Image: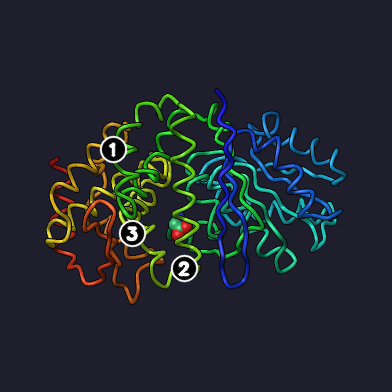
């Protein structure tokens, strides 16, 4: 039976208030009407990957035309390695060729990388045009599409160039996950597990029970889990748009996770896989500091294993190299890393005075798990 429930959460930031809609079939039902309404007669520029044109972007453009909106379509290649200024420049060129003006609505149809690139291009084109995020991966639906973080990577590190550019709306349709490559689905589950650990022990308990069904893409389990993650993210971003405080907890597992991604040149690990490894690093560091109970580490590892996610550090990268990459992370302050550590399943704290020797010891422990 198709679940027709639509969950809507509001993100309220000082500059913009916008809805996050989550529901089965929204790509074909709500998306065209809402986007056309937001555009009010102006043009719509959809950005997607070549592989998503026939499935999602072209039908959306057709539906937008029926709603009276003039729609153009641009494609960019998939993959974290395309998250560069060169890809942004390609979008600027496309949009300039079509003479898009400041009233244009940009629509990002794809995963987190596409949303970040497109959001950044929208934030900077003509000093800023509106964007609607239509995430089609689990990772983008529960995290990347909400909260306005946009940007690209530099050789020196991930997301080093970017801006906060809140979307006009986020429309997440779990039916898009039916054709998502399995590894991408698993990668997204790492972020779902993360929300349970950082914020909601009941969510964590329900995820553990429903992971096998979620891996089978059982909509009855995926939809409420996605909705709860969106609700948590909307609440956190509303409290702290620019990550001066509570928003930092969303980076649980990301300090070592980003370092793993950078050190392996975005070739080996999906983002969620690297975050899974990083969450275990954070647990071990928290344990060493007496902050994280051992039971939290074992529960985290059990959930990651159930989801088929990695938790060991790659042996080909030294711990020192990982620390060096982590120090370049833009979340470091005056060269000091800020570690998000779990105090229990559902609560976290941020520590910035962790000795490198402790981190190195824990990374070694993680190799021996
Ligand atoms: N992905 C973490 C954040 O949006 O803050």
Instruction: Tell which circle, 3 or 1, labels the residue nearer the N-terminal end.
Output: 1
Foreground label between 2 and 1: 2
Count the marks. 3
The foreground one among 61 and 121 is 61
Let me know if residue 62 appears in the view: yes
Looking at the rendering, the quadrant in which ligand 1 lies is bottom left
Rendering coords of residue 93 (x, y %): 75, 54
Rendering coords of residue 11 (x, y %): 56, 60
Foreground label between 3 and 1: 1
Apparent side of residue 350 relative to residue 165 in the rendered image (left or right): left
Dot 1 corresponds to which residue? 304
Is disc 3 placed on a helix, strand or loop?
Answer: helix
Q: Quadrant of residue 255?
A: bottom left
Indicate which disc residue 239 carries. 2
Spatial CA distance of label 2 from label 1 is 29 Å
Rendering coords of residue 175 (x, y %): 57, 31
Apparent side of residue 64 relative to residue 205 in the rendered image (left or right): right
Q: Which residue is found at the position 17% from the left and 56% from the top? A: 292
Apparent side of residue 19 relative to residue 211 in the rendered image (left or right): right
Spatial CA distance of label 2 from label 3 is 29 Å
Instruction: Tell which circle, 2 or 1, labels the residue nearer the N-terminal end.
Output: 2
The foreground one among 301 and 207 is 207
Q: Quadrant of residue 26?
A: top right
Quadrant for the C terminus in the image: top left
Q: Is residue 58 above or below residue 89?
A: above
């Amino acid at each position: 039976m198709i679940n027709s429930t639509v969950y809507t959460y509001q993100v309220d930031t000082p500059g913009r208030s916008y809805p996050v809609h989550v529901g089965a079939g929204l790509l074909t039902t709500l998306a065209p009407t809402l986007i056309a309404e937001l555009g009010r007669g102006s043009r719509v520029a959809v950005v997607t990957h070549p592989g998503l044109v026939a499935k999602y972007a072209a039908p959306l453009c057709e539906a937008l035309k029926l709603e009276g909106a003039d729609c153009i379509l641009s494609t960019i290649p998939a993959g974290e390695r395309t998250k560069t200024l060169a890809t942004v420049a390609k979008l600027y060129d496309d949009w300039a060729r079509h003479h898009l003006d400041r009233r244009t609505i940009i629509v990002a149809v794809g995963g987190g990388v596409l949303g970040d690139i497109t959001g950044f291009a929208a934030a900077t084109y003509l000093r800023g045009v509106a964007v609607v995020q239509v995430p089609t991966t689990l990772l983008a639906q529960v995290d990347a599409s909400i909260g306005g973080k946009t940007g690209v990577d530099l050789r020196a590190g991930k997301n080093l160039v970017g801006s906060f550019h809140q979307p006009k709306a986020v429309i997440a349709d779990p039916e898009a996950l039916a054709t998502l490559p399995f590894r991408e689905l698993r990668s997204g589950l790492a972020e779902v597990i993360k929300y349970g650990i950082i914020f909601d022990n009941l969510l964590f308990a329900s995820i553990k029970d429903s992971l096998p069904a979620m891996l089978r893409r059982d909509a009855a389990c995926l939809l409420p889990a996605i909705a709860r993650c969106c609700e948590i993210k909307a609440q956190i971003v509303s409290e702290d748009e620019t990550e001066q405080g509570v928003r930092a907890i969303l980076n649980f597992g990301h300090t070592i996770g980003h370092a793993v991604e950078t050190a392996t040149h975005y070739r080996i690990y999906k983002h969620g896989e690297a975050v899974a490894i990083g969450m275990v690093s954070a647990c071990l560091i928290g344990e060493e500091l007496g902050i994280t109970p051992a039971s939290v580490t074992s529960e985290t590892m059990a959930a990651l294993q159930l989801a088929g996610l990695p938790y060991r550090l790659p042996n080909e990268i030294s711990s020192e190299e990982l620390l060096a990459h982590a120090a370049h992370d833009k979340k470091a302050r005056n060269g000091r890393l800020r570690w998000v550590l779990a105090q229990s399943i559902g609560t976290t704290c941020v520590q910035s005075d962790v000795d490198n020797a402790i981190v190195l010891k824990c990374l070694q422990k993680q190799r021996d798990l």
